[in-house]
Each structure stands twice: as C-alpha cells, then as structure tokens.
Amino acid sequence: MAEVRNKQVILKDYVRGFPKESDMIVTSSNLKLKLPEGSKGVLVKNLYLSCDPYMRTRMSYHDTSASYVDSFKPASPISGHGVSKVLESGDPNLKEGDLVWGMTGWEEYSILNATQGLFKIHHTDVPLSYYTGILGMPGMTAYAGFYELASPKKGEYVYVSAASGAVGQLVGQFAKLVGCYAVGSAGSKEKVDLLKDKFGFDDAFNYKEEPELDAALKRYFPEGIDIYFENVGGKMLDAVLLNLRDHARIPLCGMISQYNLEKPEGVHNLMQLILRNARMEGFVVGEYYHLYPKFLEFILPHIRQGNIQYVEDIAEGLESGPAALIGLFSGRNVGKQVVVVSRE
Amino acid sequence: MAEVRNKQVILKDYVRGFPKESDMIVTSSNLKLKLPEGSKGVLVKNLYLSCDPYMRTRMSYHDTSASYVDSFKPASPISGHGVSKVLESGDPNLKEGDLVWGMTGWEEYSILNATQGLFKIHHTDVPLSYYTGILGMPGMTAYAGFYELASPKKGEYVYVSAASGAVGQLVGQFAKLVGCYAVGSAGSKEKVDLLKDKFGFDDAFNYKEEPELDAALKRYFPEGIDIYFENVGGKMLDAVLLNLRDHARIPLCGMISQYNLEKPEGVHNLMQLILRNARMEGFVVGEYYHLYPKFLEFILPHIRQGNIQYVEDIAEGLESGPAALIGLFSGRNVGKQVVVVSRE
C-alpha cells in the first residue's frame, strides 16, 4: 500500500481578533493511502477547497452556543467545503473515481469517516471548482435565503451587502431574474464595477467611501428596501433598518463584519421592524439541502446558457490556503475564493 | 343646542426622556354638542380610555420614520383607544346610542371626523371597559402576534416579557390553551404572583431581581426558548437571543424599555438568529384587524366560561389620566391600565 507525504494546513492555536496568515502553518505528515479495515467512509484526494466567512468562527474556541459547527482543533488540519475525488470507498453508494463535494480536510488526501454530508457530482460539463461555490454550499445558501426566506416579488427593491462574494453575486443575479431592482455594496472600486458590469446589479456602491451608511442607502433606495440580504451585520444592518419598506424581509445569511470582534457591535434600530411589519430571519444552509436537486435543475441551465455570471478568485496550491482564507476578512478576494490543491 | 364644558387632557409640549405627569394638564373648553353641518363623522361621549405603551412615542416629536402614528400636537388634547357612546352620527352605519371602540380624544366628548377606525360593539354582556383591552386593540395584538406570527405548537417553551400587562397576560394564557410551557417576567412580586396564581403561567420571575438576565433565562428555560413574545426590547432581548431553540420565533410587539431613551440600547447577539434558524418579526396590529370577527368568536366564549382571566387597573376620572398613563413606564399599573371618564 502506497504511503505518501500528505501536505496539510494546520491551525496553530485558537485565534482572537483578526486572524493572521501565521495563525496557520503548512506542513506534511505521512499517510497510508488505505481506508482502515471495515471503514464505511472514503479516502479522497482533495482537488478544490472553499474559503468561507463562517470558517472564522471555527478558529476561535467556542462552545456550541457560538456556532453551528465545532471549533477547529489546534495542531490539527482545518476543514471546510471542498471538491474531492474518491480513491477508495467503504460506502456502497460511492466508488473509486467518483467526484464528491462536501466537508473535507485542508490537506492533499483525507480519510472521511462519514459520507452523509457528501454530495456526488453528476454534472462535469461545468468547472469542477463551481461545486465549492455556485453549485455547492454558497449557491444553495443564496438560493434558500433569497427564494425561500425572502419570497421576492417582481418590482421589489433588493439590497445585497458583500455583494461580490460567493453568495452576494448570486443573490443579485437571482433578484434580476425575478424582476427586482438590485443594488449591491462592496469594498473596492474593482468590485463595484464588477457588480454593475458583470453581474448586472442596477446600481452599486463602495461602502468604505460612505461616511454615512444611512444617507447612502437613502440615495440608492429613495423608496426604501423590500429585501435586504444580510452578509455583514453591525452598522450596515443598523442603517438598513432605517430604510425598510413595509413588510420588508431580511434573510440573515452571515455577519462577516462581526466575526473578528471580541464583542459584536450593538444594533439599535430594531424598533423599525415593528413599525414596518418587517421580518428578520436567520438560516443555516444545512436546513435546506433537501432542495439541492431542485436548485441544480434551476441553476445548471442558467450557467450553461450564460444567464448567470460567476466570478472566482483562484489561489494556486495548498500553500496559498492560509493567505487566501485570511484575505476574506480584509476583502482581498474578488469573487468566490477557491484554493486549488490539485486539478485532477 | 347644548353647550358643555368639555374636560380635556392636553400635552403641554413634546417630551424628551422619561415623561412626567406635569407634561400634561387637565383643562376644559366649551363644546357645542352638535356635529358640523354635513359631517360624516360622529359626536361621541367617551366612557373608557386605554393607556398603551406605544403612546409614549407619540409624546415626542418624530417624523414618519419613528412611529406608525403621528406625534401628539402640543397644546391639544391627546388621543388613544377608547370606548365611546355615539350621541350624533353622520355615518349611516352608526346611530345615537351605539357603543363603539377605536381612536378617540382624551376628553369627555369628541367629534371624530372619520369613522373608518371605529368598531361597533355588539356584545355588552361583558364589561364595556374590556373593549380597551382584551376585546380591543391589545387583545387583537396578543392574538395576532401569538397565533399568526409565532405559530405555536403544543409542548413548546414560551417566554413573555411585561407579562402582566394588557397584552402579556393574554399571551401567557393563549400559550397555555395551546399546551405550551409558559414563563412570564414582570417588575414586582405582586405581578409575579398574579402571573402564577391568576393567569396560570407555569413559572414567573421578577426581572428587577435578576442581576444576570441570561442566567435567569437559563434557569427558567434549561431547554431553551421556542417563542419569545417581545414587549420590552434592549437587554432582555439580548439575553433571550442567547437562549433560543432551533427554529425559534420572536414576534416583536413592543419595546417599552426603550421608549424613554434618547438612543435605543444596542442588541449584540443577533448572530444567534442565524445559528438557531430563528425568526424575529415585527408587527403593527392594524395589519390584522381583518381577523377581529374571528378573534371575537374565539375569545368571547373563553371569557364567558371563565377560561381566560383578565385583570384591569382602573383609574377613576379623566383627571387621573396623566398619572395613569405615566405609570405605565414605571410599571405602576397592575394589569391593563384603563381610565374611566364616565360609566355611561
């Protein structure tokens, strides 16, 4: 049986405040390319790894009340969503050569003890890396949050924060498919241009250049906001609350602006939810995976026909993983941040 | 045509911070007991006036973004919900002697120019004052917020703040009717006893005696909270957010702890809504009045059969109005605060 050096991204210790590249190291250990006797899991070769904002919460120590997933284990490889190739399978539904996406390790090869969370990939006429984004967890997140929670109607005013990210870029395009008016915000001119020129948002702005978020929103939404797709939290949410239309909906997808703070910022304007008969609803995409087949049926034709644009920011090699992951929190990435471990 | 002295409660000027009895004066002016020529409104004699927390927001100057109702006009009589007797009607659907409830002036007699917001009272075998509370706006508020927004299920854990108030006492009893476990909080031993002994809450506590609200909630809800009926806002909401069960619902009815602050307190734990797939939904009862006939059909038998208890705090005479209204904000009232102007 082959033994390989298995390159891995290790979390050195729990992180407080803003994470740094040096909080992780890339090292390697020996691995026998063989499933343990009687295993019902799979041995996989990891191809693409997904950098997602929620992973920040796993870098800190927390009990179960602080996240829907456990903390990473210090001195162990971190984990996340990825696309992998099955090398050996103890699950009769998966066989050698199958491609899957789901939770895997940040390493070249992983032994996954359970296969419940893995999705077999059936459509390979689209780039495989898409299964870390538009065709994977972030795609389902955008779909569930927008269509299921926000119940959009034609002509409604939709605002998306972190709009050039993996989820935001899709929400904006979904909004346009429904016939909504869509405005996005992001943190650089390059991203704002992307929103308008590539993703077809009706308008977009750089939140970093707005001294008053409330004033900015009043400029972009003189009629107010029907749907706010929340990715950032904090001050932005507070400003949005002052600009709601009656019966507004706010799907809470994430709050990336808060993940590096010791204590989250206070949100002061919740009374507006009462005055506007408005709804704010948090969700974890895991609750919506039963819709995944329906989602694929919806999104694949749009991708093939070029109705939906999708932008990835590709980092080459597992070594580039720590910088790519950290870059999410300074907004360095443009589009969905992916790490390529191997292209096949 | 008779001319009378019409006693009135006047707001002296816009209020900032905690309102005082002296912010209002009781005075009187002459009134001809006659509708203006061609009026489609009604001339009414006011019998019972309702003291409601939302009235605080009307005492301050605000633009339309701060409330669903206009500010009171300084130097004019304030207004609110009340039960009145029609003396003269320009509306063919109402006639002399009819009893109505809806918005009226804090005065002995009012000329109401529009009748759209008035509900004719058909059931007089229950105390008329009930139409300021259990059979009026607060009753509909409890009904809509609990049954329509919170979709309660048997066995769920329900927490009600300001639980001995007009709305809270009903929500707790509705929760018990559904078969939920209900805990209420209030601000005195007398009220806590009332919750347990009179209204049948499974448990109750005095929030003023709890140095740590989070710890208190963990004690009363070791399994967490499915439904939080929000009447107070601020720190209580923040503590509740740390104790949610998965798929929790939070109907936002009011935030009485915030109404006297220049700037509302910050709420820090909204991320919990995401982790718990939880929903927070504001509402204004005006959106639900189409359910009023259905509500009456539901609640009247419960009142007649004694299944639902209802406690009022009755202040005698319009002169007692300012103190009664201000008392809401220090929690002086025990049960629904009503002002009797006249018993017939």
Image (tube, coloured by chain):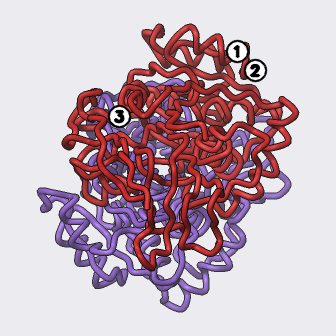
Chain colours: A red, B purple
Chain of the residue where label 2 is placed in the rendered structure: A
On the image, the x and y values in percent for residue A41 come to 49, 69
Mark number displayed over residue B163: none
Distance in Å between CA atoms under marks 2 and 3: 28 Å
Is B111 positioned to the left or the right of B184 in the image? Answer: right
Label 2 – label 1 distance at C-alpha:
5 Å
Q: Residues within 10 Å of mark 2 (few under 14, many from 20)?
A: many
Which residue appears at 62% of the width and 65% of the height?
B148
Q: Position of residue A323 (x, y in %)?
A: 37, 26
**Who is closer to the viewer here, B64 or A158?**
A158
Q: Is residue B27 above or below residue A3?
A: above
- Label 1 crowding class (10 Å Cα cut-off): few <14, some 14-19, many 20+? some
Residue A242: x %, y % from top left = 51, 28
Q: Is residue B16 left or right of residue A295?
A: left
Name the N-terminal-most of marks 2 and 3. Answer: 2
| Amino acid type, mark 3 | Gln
| Image vertical order of residue A297 relative to residue A28, above or below | below
Mark 3 — on which chain does it sit? A
- Tell me residue B37's x, y (percent): 80, 35
Mark 1 chain: A
**Picture disc at residue A196:** 1
Which of A271/B190 is in front? A271
Q: Are marks 2 and 1 on the same chain?
A: yes
- Left or right: residue A233 versus residue B185 is right
Gap between marks 3 and 1, in whole Å?
Answer: 27 Å
Q: Residue at x 33, y 40 (%)?
A: A9
**Residue under label 3:** A258
**What residue would you read off at disc 2?**
A200
Q: Amino acid at mark 1?
A: Lys
Residue at x-position 64% and y-position 10%? A193
Tell me the kind of residue under disc 2: Gly
